Amino acid sequence: MGVVRNAVSGLGFGQEASMVVFPIDPFLVGSDLTPIENAIEKFGEGLTDWQSVTTETGLREPSKVRIEANGYEAALDKMNRMFLTSTWGDGLPVNAPTAERVDWILKGTDLPRDHVIGKVMPRGGVATVETVAVSLAMAGGRPEYLPVLIAATAGLLDPGLQHDKIQATSGSTFPVVIVNGPMAKEIRLNSGFGLLGPDPQHPAGASIGRAMRLIQQNVGGALPGVGTMAIFGGMRYTNVVIAEDEDGLPEGWDPVSVDFGHAKRGENAVTVYIATGASNVMRRGVGKETQEDEAEQGLHRVASYLASPSGHYMQGHWDGTPGALLVPRIVARQLADLGWTKEKVKQFLWEHSKIPQEEVKRTGLWQWIDDASNPNTAATANDDPWAICRDPSQIILTVAGGAHPTHNFWMQGWSAIVAGQPVDLPAGWAGLIAEAEDDLGPSGEMCLI
Amino acid sequence: MDALEIFDPTGAVEVINLHAPRLDSLAGKTVAFLSDDMWQAHRMLPLVREKLQERYPDAVFIPETEFPMGTQQIDTDETVDMIVARGAEAVIVGNAS
């Protein structure tokens, strides 16, 4: 019911709808439809007797909440309990989004606080600059993180990404944000060891991603089992917010933001896509192979992960992405030294992840392809072998992770497009970074925490 | 006594549409069915249509198969225009799970 109420709200109605509701059983293959037949009067009544309690249009802005207790610690505890009972938290303690803290966060942008970034579906809550700053305040954020959060939120709300569907789906999806440009280092966003977290030395990704998740839940209504049917949840406390290891890019390998036309090299930008899974792929050999054999065998092992008969590939098959492969700089350099350009790697992965038609049919993937909403994808149902995307360039290949050769990391997509947004910095940026260095120590190459 | 005054993190919502008034009865009315083609809608909607037709023999129930089907296919202005053009006075949409 929550999914439908959210969806109706997102369409600009009150958060209610005339529904006939059943347990999950009749919706399953081969189900007994007797409950539907027995409830037939309710379908008619929904069109004749149901009444909406919403009788007026207009903007509903929530009021501030006052919490009183004997002492600051007690007030903070009480607030955190209230956040859980109000379903505004994520299960972990949050910082208090007071006016003082939110005003501090808002130093991270020159945009007015009431600037509308967009509506977050399915609930249709309005994400303003202030709204996202509130979530960032809750998530332990700092002002210098706000430009990435604003850009990432705008990317998530790109209509082409169809975030309304990924918010509500059972598929346990999560947004992935890859940051390019010099500001990534300045805010100490991780591009190396442990970049998917947790990492106390580089807290920016966790805070920004957690704030995104809170926006998805509180503004967008993606509450587990009510607003989002994500069956497993997918470890989404912090989503994925990482920097590309631009210093580790081999010669001739462009940053992801350039690959997808979102920015020029050296410009600050985010690339956003939707993932639905994460796999650590052991790509290194035992060390007794030739370099050439190890490189190619490793790529074959990666390709075998991509060659998954997954219905999720339908979403991005024609215009989006099958997912992102994270390759550490040392592996990228080995590949480049052996003559592997980025394009050649993508071409290899694309060719060797094609799925034989026999497997397409045996796994039922054929029906998903044939039923795809994009007619161009549907027309590929009989291709033998079947390619997981239209073109190799759709594979996101990013240099990221610690400088160690053993593993790659694959995050399969459920992503209609690969969105991108510039990251706009405020006029007082240098001052914010100086304050961060006072608070946290040096950033960049000198970063000790 | 200490106090914290905090923002509600849910943000604003905007109601721009009100639900349509209900019909007085389905008798003699035209009702369109719309399917996202999910969750056994291909079995359920025909059943609902058949049973409602038995109760309201002079009503017209336009099958879902006469409109685009699928989550994205029904979510278009063109589909709405088709429903209006068929003279539908009410719509039953299914299925969500």
Image (tube, coloured by chain):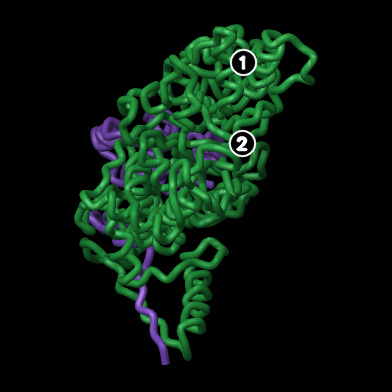
Chain colours: A green, B purple
* Label 2 chain ID: A
Q: Residue furthest front?
A: A446
Q: Position of residue A151 (x, y in %)?
A: 33, 43
In this view, A307 is above or below A162: above
Q: Residue at x 44, y 32 (%)?
A: B70
* Label 1 chain ID: A
- Which kind of residue does numbered mark 1 sit on? Ser
On the image, which quarter does residue A403 sit in? top right
- Which kind of residue does numbered mark 2 sit on? Ala
On the image, which quarter does residue A349 sit in? top right
The foreground one among A445 and A344 is: A445
Q: Which residue is mark 2?
A: A278
Q: Are marks 2 and 1 in contact (CB under 8 Å)?
A: no
The foreground one among A293 and A369 is: A293
Q: CA distance from mark 2 to mark 1?
A: 17 Å
Q: Residue at x 67, y 33 (%)?
A: A280
Q: Is residue A214 toward the left or the right of residue A31 in the image?
A: left
Label 2: element kind: loop
Q: Residue at x 36, y 69 (%)?
A: B8
Crowd class of label 2 (few under 14; some 14 to 19; many from 20; radius 10 Å) = some
Q: Which residue is mark 1?
A: A353
In this view, A240 is above or below A295: below
Crowd class of label 1 (few under 14; some 14 to 19; many from 20; radius 10 Å) = many
Q: Residue at x 38, y 51 (%)?
A: A145
Q: Position of residue A398 (x, y in %)?
A: 50, 27
Q: Earlier in the sequence, mark 2 or mark 1?
A: 2
Q: Position of residue A17 (x, y in %)?
A: 39, 57
> Can see residue A405?
yes
> Can see residue B48?
no
In this view, A378 is above or below A219: above
Label 1: element kind: loop
Picture disc at residue A318: none
